[in-house]
Every structure is written in structure tokens, then in C-alpha cells.
Amino acid sequence: MIKIAVYGKGGIGKSTTVSNLSAALAEKGLRVMQIGCDPKADSTSGLRHNEKLRTVLELVREKGSAVTLEEMTMEGFGGVICVEAGGPTPGTGCAGRGIIAALEKLAEKGAYETYAPDVVFYDVLGDVVCGGFSMPMRSGYADKVFVVTSGENMAIHAAANIGLAVENFRGRGYAGLGGIILNRREVKREDEKVQELCEDLNTKLVGTLSRSETVQAAEELGMTVIEAFPESDMAAEYRALAKAVLEAAGGTLC
């Protein structure tokens, strides 16, 4: 089992990217689990045609220890096991602590043993990397961390902070940095700025995604590009990126 955490600034296209990576690997016959660690709880929506999925925290608040693993999961496109951690009731609690509680509950209920995934993706909001938001980096969770960014200054800034957090946590046995994913926004000096980021973080550019209307068209259908437009150029880009990410995390794709 290979466990991969994907971080990035809010709105950078991280969840769309992760969902398409999950779909691409599932398409190749791998058993994939995607765990959304964003309080908005919309990480996996494109894998399940926007069908409602109750979050782990919502279920725990309602049912306590009686909640079952089956209630916390839903099968999406290609058999991807979809989970949404969720967040606290608005105005109360800490989103980071919510992630900790959700991941601990999944482990307690034997999610990894029951579903035996080949690949697990943690989709994590990366505007801040503290407390619960660093949970997927910890020993026993992710093996590698990948960061999605564009060449926009705020996205670069967030990516740099995430990379520094991974470096600072390294001595504690946390996951290492697997590389950077460029999700293009076609801003000035985008390639140069992202390459400079890679050099500053002593990591590599794992892959690049084009800015494409195909992505928005698929989202409007409540699908991934892999499902909605499997023969498109963007689907090919996601497949290539899935292969590169898996290999950078120590796996192989036949």
C-alpha cells in the first residue's frame, strides 16, 4: 500500500487533480482510496457524480462509536473508495483537530485492512500546515507529500510553506516531499517561478497540467475528466501525471 498526501492552496485545483489521479489509477486496475481532509468535504464529489456523502465527523457526532465503516465510505468511479473527513460545526471547534479525529476513527474501524487499497490519497488543504493539517504527513499515514501549485504568487508562497513544513517534520519520521505539480494558470514567468520553487525546496517537478476548459466541462457534469472525456488531451495528461506521482512515491504502474 502506497500512501500519498497532496497539499496545495485553496482553489488551486488540488481536489480536481487528486480525483483525476485516483480515477486514472483505478482505470489501470489499482484499488484506490481517496480521503478528503478539507472541511468543505468536496474532495471526492467528481468521483461520485456529486452524490451526497456524509462526513466522518458528521457521523461521529450523530452516532458516536456506533458508526460503521460502511457508513463513512462510498464507492465512486472505477471503484475508488471515497471518504470525506469533514469539519466541526461552523463557529465551534478546530478544523485541524477534526482531521485528526476523522483519520483516527478510520484507522480504529479498520479502513485500510478492510478495503486493502493499493494507493491511498489524502487531499489536504495547504493554506496552513499546523496541527491536524499536518496529520496526513505523520508516520503511519502518508509515505510522500506532493504539492500542487500554479505560478501565482500566493500559490507559490503556500507551496513554499508546505515544503518547509515537510522539511521541518522530517526528523520526526514524517513523510518526505515527493515533488511539485504545476497546475497552469498561464501567468507571467510561471515555469521559471515553479522551477525556482523546486530548486529552493530541493525537489523536482513531477508533472504539469494544462489550463483547459475540458476540466471545467467535466466538473459541470459532476465527473472527472478521466470519466467524462477519456479520449481528451487532458485525460492523457492526468494519466501521465498519475504514473509519475506513483513512481515518485515508490510504486509502479504496469
Image (cartoon, rainbow, N blue to C red):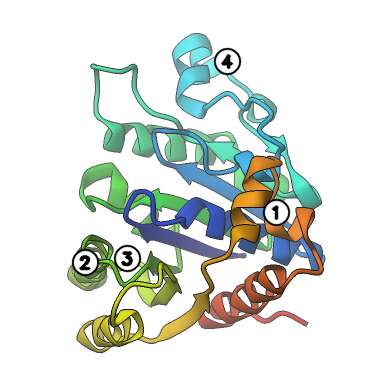
Q: Residues within 10 Å of mark 3 (few under 14, many from 20)?
A: many
Q: Determine contact: label 1, label 3, CB under 8 Å.
A: no
Q: Which residue is mark 4?
A: 66
Query: How far separated are the C-alphas under marks 2 and 4?
Result: 46 Å
Residue 113 appears anywhere in the view: no
Q: Considering depth in this image, is 219 or 65 the residue closer to the camera?
A: 219
Dot 1 lies on which element?
loop
Q: Position of residue 73 (x, y in %)?
A: 65, 34
- In the drawing, what numbered circle is on residue 174? 3
Amino acid residing under circle 3: Tyr
State which quarter of the image contains the C terminus: bottom right
Which label's residue is closer to the chain start, 4 or 1?
Answer: 4
Q: Residue at x 35, y 75 (%)?
A: 177
Query: How far separated are the C-alphas under marks 1 and 3?
Result: 22 Å
Number of numbered tags placed on the structure image: 4
For marks 3 and 2, give the one nearer the viewer: 2
Q: Position of residue 7 (x, y in %)?
A: 38, 59
Q: Position of residue 248 (x, y in %)?
A: 51, 82
Q: Which residue is mark 2?
A: 153
Which label's residue is closer to the chain start, 1 or 2?
Answer: 1
Q: Residues within 10 Å of mark 4 (few under 14, many from 20)?
A: few
Q: Which residue is mark 1?
A: 116
Q: Residue at x 78, y 55 (%)?
A: 227
Amino acid residing under circle 4: Ala
Dot 4 lies on which element?
helix
Q: Is residue 117 above or below residue 159?
A: above
Q: In the visual, does 167 lie left or right of 245? A: left
Q: In the visual, does 24 lie left or right of 201? A: right
User: Among all residues in the image, which is located at the extreme top?
Assistant: 62
Query: How far separated are the C-alphas under marks 3 and 4?
Result: 31 Å
Which label's residue is closer to the chain start, 1 or 3?
Answer: 1
